[in-house]
Image (cartoon, helix red, strand yellow):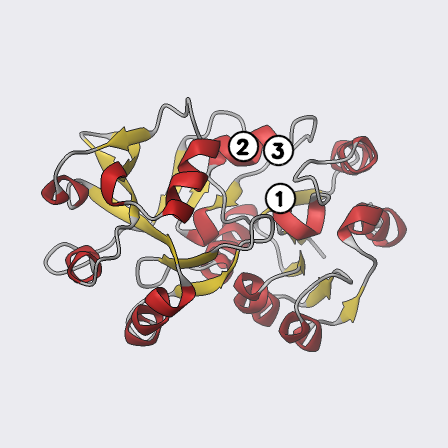
Amino acid sequence: MKTLYLSDLDGTLLGSGARLSPFTAAAIGDLVARGMLFSYATARSYQTARRVTAGLEARIPLIVYNGAMVVDSTDGSFLLQNFFAPGGEPPTEELLSGDVYPIVYAFVDGKETCSFLWERCSDEAKRFLDTRAGDPRLRPVSREAELLQGEVFYLSCIDRPQKLLPFYARYRERFPCLFQQDLYTGDTWLEILPPGASKANAARQLKALLGCRRLVAFGDGLNDLDLFALADEAYAVENAVPELKAAATGVIGRNDADSVARWLQSHWQG
């Protein structure tokens, strides 16, 4: 039976240094060359995902931005897209009225952009943006109105948890929302996606695109819960959050032990 194997990146396929080990890259590359259908589903963009997975042969589409987009693995072109509807969405103006200044991912004049109002960004958001220096998508703006431009597909709010929590409570019934600490910095993120966008929905679309009947998933975080609910088999790494372990078919080793690659080597049958 044709099966899609789908892994989260940070905290799952990647080690603690946010890099792919040579062992994992070689092991998965060998399995892919022999016919395994493997991809990943990540909160990262195509650009940053490809950078941290250098050396990995991914020959089928990739799920990025937590399922808001599915992209071609070779050139990053968008195959499936989810946008906020015009007329009141996304809730950028509501966030601004609460003194929360999101990083806004959108297409402006047909170009993928990452817009922000630097002087109003939180210290946490500024630290994140500093790590993306040189990224051609960065679009600093000078006015709040400019944050509302374009076809918006993702909002990232990085701030103090007590400031973000009321917005999470307000929006979680209207939009797919993620409220959690960053794995590497410990900063609190509130991420808001268009209605219908999720890792699970993107995986469902990718399965149909590839003609797969089964899905086997791997993950570590709360943003993998919907994917685990969809999967026929789902494996949490040892360092995963308790909620994901409870939803898993089983628990494998830690991300730093190349556990996803070792499980695939042991269980995939070509």
SS assignment at label 3: helix
What's the mark number on residue 73?
Answer: 2
Residue 140 image offset from top left, x and y in percent: 25, 31
Relative side of 77 to 238, left or right: left
* Quadrant in which the N terminus appears: bottom right
The three-letter amino acid code for the residue at tag 2 is Ser
Q: Which residue is mark 3?
A: 52
Amino acid residing under circle 1: Ser
Instruction: Identify the element where label 1 is drawn.
Output: strand
**Label 2 CA crowd tier, 10 Å (few <14, some 14–19, many 20+):** some
- Name the residue rendered at 76%, 33% in the picture: 25
Q: Position of residue 93 (x, y in %)?
A: 15, 57
Choose between 244 and 214: the one closer to the eye. 244
Sequence-first tag of 2 and 3: 3
* Disc 2 element: loop
Name the residue at 48% across, 25% down.
Answer: 75
On the image, which quarter does residue 58 sit in? top right
User: Quick check: 182 above or below 111?
Assistant: below
Which residue is identified by label 1? 39
User: 123 and 181: which one is in front?
Assistant: 123
Q: Nearer the viewer, mark 2 or mark 3?
A: 3
The residue positioned 60% from the left and 46% from the top of the image is 40
Q: CA distance from mark 2 to mark 3?
A: 14 Å
Residue 29 lies left or right of residue 136; in this view the side is: right
Q: Give above or below for 59 relative to 233.
A: above
Kindly report the distance in space between the C-alpha atoms of the residues bearing marks 3 and 1: 14 Å
* Mark closest to the chain's N terminus, 3 or 1: 1
State whether residue 117 appears in this view: no
Name the amino acid, label 3.
Val
Earlier sequence position, callout 1 versus callout 2? 1
